[in-house]
Image (spheres, rainbow, N blue to C red):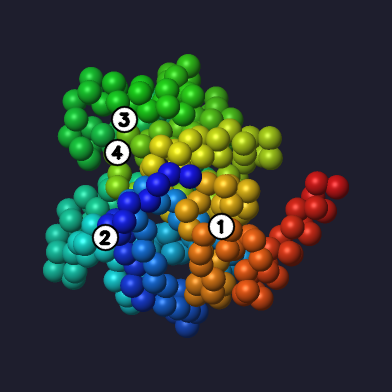
Amino acid sequence: MANVETQDPVLRIKGLRKSFGTLDVLKGISLDVKRHEVVGIIGPSGSGKSTLLRCINHLEKPTAGEIFLEGALVGGGAKAPGSVLAAQRADMAMVFQSFNLWPHKSTLENVTEMLVTVHGKSREEADAIGRKMLAKVGMTEKADQYPSRLSGGQQQRVGIARALAMEPKVILFDEPTSALDPELVGEVLGVMTELAREGCTMVVVTHEMGFAREACSVVNFIDGGVIVDSGPPDHIFGGSANERTNSFLCRYMRQLGRVLN
């Protein structure tokens, strides 16, 4: 686990709320993410985990609350130009559950497209960065392949390379292994664990409890749209005093045992 710098947070969330009509999904989430910190988000289905990530980079507009990236209000306020949010989104790269690769572009093109269109880099410079990032996730030999020729695990590694290429201040992972066959999960988690060791700042919504326990600096347990428990992995997984946390983890382990048996 990487050392976490004692400084102002890269990402600060204050009183975040999100409603869809009469349904309150997030009910006042507040948390800080420091540089080089890996923040895990766990909890039952429907608890608001993915909505939290989508609100952080304004893929979903929050109903209330504030989000700050390095002290700047995300979105810049009602009168701010759209370019402000676009730049901030580039600094908060997101890795999705379903890969979201362009099917008509090669692996390398999927990694480099945003470097050219958003960062204004030349095609040659973008290609050099793209190949470096593909090498980082073990996908060098697949640079010219199209997504349809890749396994789910390979596609997700391309998604991670695309995020890394943007040199973001924080990477948001939305259950990055949930769409993978069980035998492919390890290759993606291996890449993420290495990024954690290297000090990459990450917020990870995950149902992989082993990853949360071994790679995360802080784990937040969300239930019913609120953070009901938070702390280092030893607190969450080592016998938290919070009854709801223990109930969730016990149920999860029972379900996992049934699957393995």
Label 1 Cα crowd, 10 Å radius (few <14 / some 14-19 / many 20+): many
**Image location (x, y in percent) of residue 63:** 35, 75
What residue does disc 3 label?
A: 112
Q: State if disc 3 and disc 4 touch (CB < 8 Å).
A: no
Which mark is nearer the camera, 3 or 1? Answer: 1
What residue does disc 2 label?
A: 8
Could you tell me which secondary element the residue under label 3 belongs to?
helix
| Residue name at image x 34 percent, y 67 percent | 13
| Residue placed furthest toward the right | 261
What residue does disc 1 label?
A: 233
Earlier sequence position, callout 1 versus callout 2? 2
Earlier sequence position, callout 3 versus callout 1? 3
| Residue name at image x 38 percent, y 43 percent | 200
Earlier sequence position, callout 2 versus callout 3? 2
Looking at the rendered structure, the kind of residue marked 3 is Thr
Q: CA distance from mark 1 to mark 4?
A: 29 Å
